[in-house]
Every structure is written in structure tokens, then in C-alpha cells.
Image (cartoon, rainbow, N blue to C red):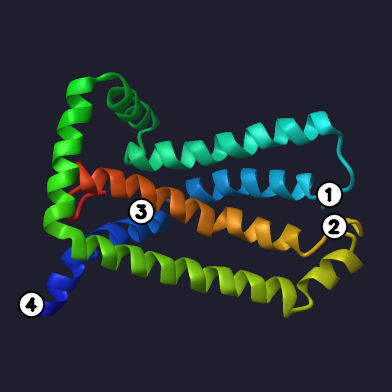
Amino acid sequence: MITSLRIRQSLVWVIQSLLFFKKHYMIILALGMVAALGRAAQLRAFGPISPIADNALEVIIQFARIMVFVYALGLTNVKKGIARIKLLLTSKATWKENSRIAFQKFKKDWRSIVANFVIYLLIALLVNKLIDYAAYQTCLYAKLKTHSIISGDSSEWVIILFFKNLSVIPFTLIFNAVFLLWVTNKMTIGKE
């Protein structure tokens, strides 16, 4: 029991990231879908597009990703997330205080940081392997082309990046936002 609690406490950062992703999946899925469809269009999944459309889609994709990060950084409050970024970038005192707290956290909990990174990397590796399997080892790509759901000019990368924009990329953004909250003591166990 004590060992289980100790493991949970040392992996709080990755656990909170997974819980946040799970609890707010619909919003994250919606933002991920914007990025996924935009990236698919850029890869000619729906046919050729103009360079202007390609650039406009890139802005939309990046905006959706930034929104996932800010949403997580503000713990579902976008205004709070923006305020945290603004405060960090404009207040020298806040920067110094957060740097001091982060340095202490690194010094004290470096094993926990390493463990969280390793678990995150294993999760990302597993999801990426599953996405690659879906793209290269199943008939999904062929079926999508056969039924004219995607263009004949597109490649397996449409499937790969579509699923990454719904899974690994938003999870990474949430993981990074939660890390910033955790390392500056803005996130506590049991809260999100």
C-alpha cells in the first residue's frame, strides 16, 4: 500500500496528464480533429490544395495545438492559461520565483522527473507503434482509397498524422503544460 502510494506520488505528473486527457477528451478531441483534418488536407487527402490554403491550414493547425497547451496550462481555463504565460514572460519577479522553485524541484525530485519522462516515452512509443501498425499493417489505407474517402494522391502519412493529431501530439502538449504546473508547484495531487 505504501509502495503504491509512493509510486503514484512520484509519477503524479504523468498520471495527472493522463487524467486530464481522459477527463477533457471531448474538447481535446475537437481541437485535435481540427489539426488532424487540416494536416490531412495539407497531405492531399482530399485532393490538391493551393499554397495559400496550405499556409492558412498551417496557421489553423498550430492555433489548435496552442489552444490545447493553453487549455491544459490554465487547467481548462484558457484565459488563466494565457495569463500564466503572460505573467511568466513579462514579470521578472515571477520568472525568478518560478526558476527558484523549479531548481529546488529538480534537485529534490530528479528521480521522479526521470521516471515521468520514461513512462511518457513508453506511452508515446506504444501509441506511435499502434498508429504505424494501423497505417502499414492493416488494410485501412487501401480501404480509405478504395471507397474514395481519401485521394489516390495521398500516402500512408495521412493516416499516421491524422491519428497522431488526435493522440500523441495533444498528449505531449498536455504533458508539457502539466510539467510546467508541477515543476512550479501550481498543481497538487488530486487537483487538475
Q: Secondary structure at mark 1?
A: loop
Mark 4 or mark 1: which comes first in sequence? Answer: 4
Residue 134 x/y as whole percent: 68, 73
Kindly identify which numbered label has been placed on residue 154.
Answer: 2
- Does 22 appear above or below 99? below
Q: Residues within 10 Å of mark 4 (few under 14, many from 20)?
A: few
Residue 29 x/y as whole percent: 54, 51
The residue that label 3 is drawn on is 20
- Does 87 appear above or below 17? above
Amino acid at pointer 1: Arg
Q: Is residue 25 among what the camera can see?
A: no
Residue 91 x/y as whole percent: 24, 20
Q: Residue, x 14% and y 38% (percent of image)? A: 100
Mark 1 vs mark 3: in front: 1
Kindly identify which numbered label has been placed on residue 44.
Answer: 1
Apparent side of residue 8 relative to residue 157 in the rendered image (left or right): left
Amino acid at pointer 4: Ile
Kindly identify which numbered label has been placed on residue 2.
Answer: 4
Residue 144: quadrant of the picture: bottom right
Count how many numbered circles sit on residues in the image: 4
Apparent side of residue 15 relative to residue 166 in the rendered image (left or right): left
Q: Secondary structure at mark 3?
A: helix
